[in-house]
Image (tube, grey):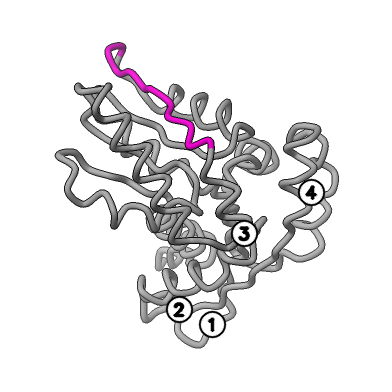
Amino acid sequence: MGELKGTSVEITCLHTAARHVPRFSALFEAEGWEGRVAHIVRPDLLARAQAGGPEAVRGEVSQIIGSHMAGDALLCSCSTLGPLIESLAAEYVRVDRPVMEAAARYKRVMLVICLESTRAATVNLFEACAKAPDVRAHVIMCQAAWSLFEEADMAGFYAAIAQDVVAGMDVLTDTDCVVLAQASMDGAAALLSELRVPVMTTPVLAVRRAIDVARHQHIQPAAPSS
């Protein structure tokens, strides 16, 4: 991506947990991104969306983006806010869309979540991405995991997710793909390396999508010579 070096290209990330900032910064660096990355952290948006639904924060999210986003692309790392983000602008990147597009190529998909507020958004997105009529998804709710995330016990958080996935695989024996559907869950993938099926996470694919959007927005094709 040398053509971006020294330019003012910027990607804005909207997070609802400060823990995502170093993770996403590292991912952009690993992908060779040479533009800037700006992070907005608003945990209160998730709390209010959980209590009153995403529409309860529509006005404020729109205002935040309008006030702070001066970049070429926006990535929202919160799955609960994903549908809201896309409704504001089609080019905004919701963190789970790229992985759902990839997972929809499989027939029996396990969607793993740890917040009830993400269930409808996750299932609806997968169903929209799945074109074949015989594709099926089953949701695994990691009920006990989120409190560990809130306590910053990341080892316990990842272990709880992995335990629930393994238990789910014992029951859903025809599963051919596992999706850890929230950005916070991606660290659990390392504990699931022995599974016989691919385990997909959201952050890497979302970062790549945001880079593609930013490059498209910033780099215009040269006008044809006369």
Q: Residue at x 58, y 26 (%)?
A: 120
Q: Are marks 4 and 3 in contact (CB under 8 Å)?
A: no
Q: Is residue 188 depicted above or below 165 in this figure?
A: below
Q: Tell me the quarter of the picture where residue 111 sits.
A: top left
Residue hosting label 2:
4
Amino acid at dot 4: Ser
Which stretch did the figure color magenta? 133-143
Mark 4, residue position: 62
Q: Nearer the viewer, residue 226 or 49?
A: 49
Asked which secondary structure carries label 1, the reply is loop
The answer to whether 168 is drawn above or below residue 189 in the figure is: above
Query: Which label is found at residue 151?
Result: 3
- What crowding class fits label 1: few (fewer than 14 Cα within 10 Å), some (14-19), or many (20 or more)? few
Which residue shows up at 79% across the image and 57% down it?
A: 64
- In this orientation, which residue lies closer to the viewer: 163 or 22? 163
In terms of secondary structure, where does tag 2 sit? helix
Residues at badges 2 and 1 in contact (C-beta under 8 Å)? yes
User: For the view shown, which residue lies furthest in the top direction?
Assistant: 133
Q: Quadrant of the C terminus?
A: bottom left
Which residue corresponds to the image point at 76% horizontal and 66% vertical from the top-left?
68
Crowd around label 4: few <14 · some 14–19 · many ≥20 (10 Å): few
Q: Disc number at residue 7?
A: 1
Name the N-terminal-most of marks 4 and 3: 4
User: Which comes before the other along the chain, label 2 or label 4?
Assistant: 2
Cα–Cα gap, marks 2 and 3: 39 Å
Q: Quadrant of the N terminus?
A: bottom left
